[in-house]
Image (cartoon, rainbow, N blue to C red):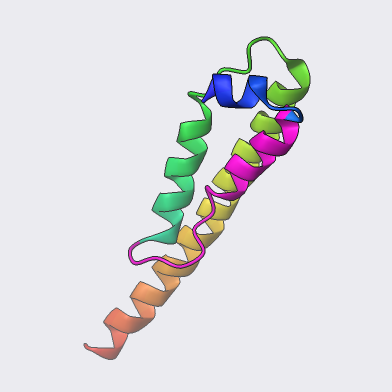
Amino acid sequence: MPRLVNAAPDPMAVVRALVARLRPVMSSGSRSTKLETGANLLDQFDVQGNLVRAAFIDAQKMKLHQEAREYRDWETKLDKARDERFE
């Protein structure tokens, strides 16, 4: 992936596109888990010393983790409400 990004005419556009793909649009399973997985994938990204890219990726990781926490809270409330209906 670093070769794809670093060889691109606009490397930041490629990074932004890759980060956007880490947010699931529709899927089955836990959205919070998918967001956490995406954030963890960014840890493996080699910015090759580019501080702008590193700062952008760090900010995106924080956003993904925050979104994951929010969805996890929502999923927990939804599960709790569903479980209480069957008691």
Magenta run includes residue 14: yes
Check the picture and name the quadrant holding the C terminus.
bottom left
Please say if 14 is above or below 80.
above
In front of the other: 62 or 38: 38
Q: Splitting the image into 4 quarters, where does residue 75 fall?
A: bottom left
Magenta run includes residue 62: no
Q: What stretch is highlighted in magenta?
A: 11-29
Q: In this view, does 17 lie to the left or right of 51?
A: left
| Residue 41 x, y percent position in the rendering | 46, 33
The residue under the point 57% across, 26% down is 4
Please say if 18 is above or below 47.
below
Question: Residue farthest to the top?
Answer: 49
The residue under the point 68% across, 41% down is 16
Q: Splitting the image into 4 quarters, where does residue 19 fall?
A: top right
Q: Is residue 16 left or right of residue 78?
A: right
| Residue 82 x, y percent position in the rendering | 32, 82
